[in-house]
Image: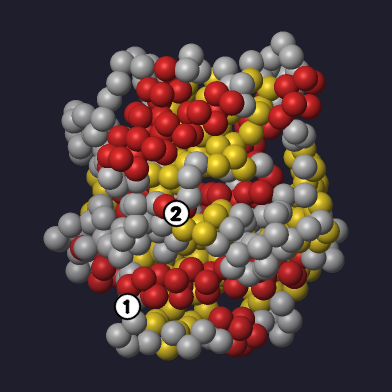
Amino acid sequence: MRLELGKITIRDVAFGPQTKVEAGTLYVNKDELVSLVKEDPNIKSLTVHLAKPGEEVRIIPVKDVIEPRCKVSGPGGIFPGFISKVETVGSGRTHVLSGAAVVTTGKIVGFQEGVIDMTGPGADYTPFSQTYNVVLDIQPVDGLAQHEHEKTVRLAGLKAAAYLGEAGKDVEPDSIETYELGSFIETAAKYPNLPKVVYIYMLQSQGLLHDTWVYGVDAKRILPSIIHPNELFDGAIVSGNCVSACDKNTTYHHLNSPVIKELYKHHGKDICFMGVVITNENVTLKDKERSSSYASKLAKMLGAEAAIVSEEGFGNPDADLIMNCNKLEGYGIKTVLITDEYAGRDGASQSLADVSTKADAVISAGNANEIIKLPPMKKVIGDLSVADIIAGGFDGSKAADGSLIVELQVITGATNELGYSNLRGIGY
């Protein structure tokens, strides 16, 4: 597969009579966007806001972040299984509104939702303080069940991102990134003397609003599968979960996986990148054993000599992470793990819920329990009252002046386990 990503740099966002990209500015026809998204009868009200880097704006509770993209050529369309029909994507050309994002907020769905501050100390911990955000404040109809509420918000965000992405379809990109990976046989034969590396991509799939979707299928319903890395760039995987905001893979993260981009960067130079195995994070021991055995088997069948494994979430999924590690190492596959830590506010507690002597190469994305004070903002988009109940908040988190004392856990993307963040752990 060969995919070209045409990057159109967005330097500003504004409302206008026509949705278009002009001279680096994304203009948004607010009425047209609201009309499109409100076609869903489950939405009672929708307000569209703009939030720019440096503004005194707080968005809470954040549900998802999505980068606007559109297919220009090649099979399928963006977000297959949701916005476009189910056809394999990952080839041809896709245009990206780089620097823009759709952020969804509104009435809380589940307690593990997040905060994005566009300025101040909190802004340093989230990449989305640096994007030009089109924020959808969505209020559902009365009495809507949680799972339908999550679905409504998820689809609203994807619709909005696809709508905005179309504005870049006929725009000449500022740069083009090309990603190409052939068949396993061709790839291995091309670089016979380089170590063969496979990426094991763990997807949050524990249910109870902890879900990820692959071509429109809930990941907890799949066996581990081989997927071409390019498919992620066209939205084959989207977020639908309320896992803690700090280490949740938003849809934006799936579209911009730094692990995959880094593996491509090294491919043919010091490694031979054989592809991606997606696997789920389960609840029962039986399901964990099944998925970890199946994922490691696929890596062995691909001829992997080394594997990178990234986690999503913490606690229960730590068991999946360690099982994957043990079974890969059991096949003689050298394994590197990427995770974050919940080591207590003083950093002195056990970082993971499970451990193994074979997990001797671990990259930390930081300690999510660290406390931070976030000053009040002039404008709040969403509902500040939930600060005391979202994961990482606690009784008394919200002060009378609107400032917050919280754990990093509340900040969207703060300890992202793909490394799409500003924090790193230091090993001694």
Q: Measuring 42% from the left and 88% from the top, which residue is drawn there? A: 44
| Coloration mode | secondary structure
Q: Position of residue 369 (x, y in %)?
A: 25, 42
The secondary element bearing badge 2 is classed as helix
Mark number for residue 419? Answer: none
Q: On the image, numbered disc 1 is attached to which residue?
A: 145
Nearest the camera: 415 or 299?
A: 299
The secondary element bearing badge 1 is classed as loop
Pointer 2 and pointer 1: residues touching (CB < 8 Å)? no
Q: Measuring 68% from the left and 22% from the top, which residue is drawn there? A: 272
Q: Position of residue 291 (x, y in %)?
A: 42, 38
Q: Position of residue 86 (x, y in %)?
A: 66, 63
Mark number for residue 221? Answer: 2
- What kind of residue is marked 1? Ala
- What kind of residue is marked 2? Arg
Quadrant for the N terminus in the image: top right
